[in-house]
Amino acid sequence: MYELVLKTHFSAAHRLREYEGDCERLHGHNWAIEVRVRTAQLNHLGMVADFREVKRLVQEVIGRLDHHFLNDIPPFDEINPTTENIARFLFDGLAKALPEGVRPAGVTAWESEGCGVSYSDE
């Protein structure tokens, strides 16, 4: 199995509903995102996929969140915009966008330098 790894970031604000602590109040993060996509078969060029294309697809999904108040946009208008749910949102969005034969292996969302969450469907 081959994995392509891409790192990027986005900025957004949120508040955690029903959380007893500072994070219940409006605050923001500069999330660092690591995306891993995998395939068993390399393409005709000997690549998992073109880095530029994967980056474009990741940016499309992240663009739905970047510089927004997450609590106002679906699905976070109904579910808590936790880092866990953000990682899953990005994973699911990328799964729908990747070319045939390439699938996400995992997404890690870092809300700060030392605190992050990884999501995969395995």
Image: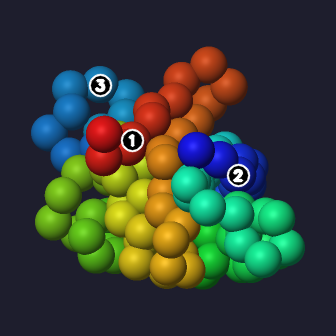
Spatial CA distance of label 3 from label 2 is 38 Å
Mark 3 or 2: the one toward you: 2
Spatial CA distance of label 1 from label 2 is 16 Å
- Tell me residue 91's x, y (percent): 43, 58
Quick check: marks 3 and 1 in contact, CB under 8 Å? Answer: no
In the rendered image, which residue does mark 3 sit on? 21
Instruction: Name the residue at 18% across, 58% down.
Output: 79
Pick whichever, 119 or 40, lies toward us.
Answer: 40
Pick whichever, 26 or 16, lies toward us.
Answer: 16
Q: Quadrant of the C terminus?
A: top left
Instruction: Name the residue at 53% across, 40% down.
Output: 108
Instruction: Name the residue at 50% across, 71% down.
Output: 101
Residue 67: image quadrant is bottom right
Spatial CA distance of label 3 from label 1 is 25 Å
Q: Against 55, is 82 above or below?
A: above
In the rendered image, which residue does mark 1 sit on? 119
In the rendered image, which residue does mark 2 sit on? 4
- Can the viewer see residue 76? yes
* Badge 1 or badge 2: first in the primary sequence: 2
- Can the viewer see residue 59? no
Q: Secondary structure at mark 2?
A: strand
Q: Quadrant of the N terminus?
A: top right
Q: Against 107, is 19 above or below?
A: above
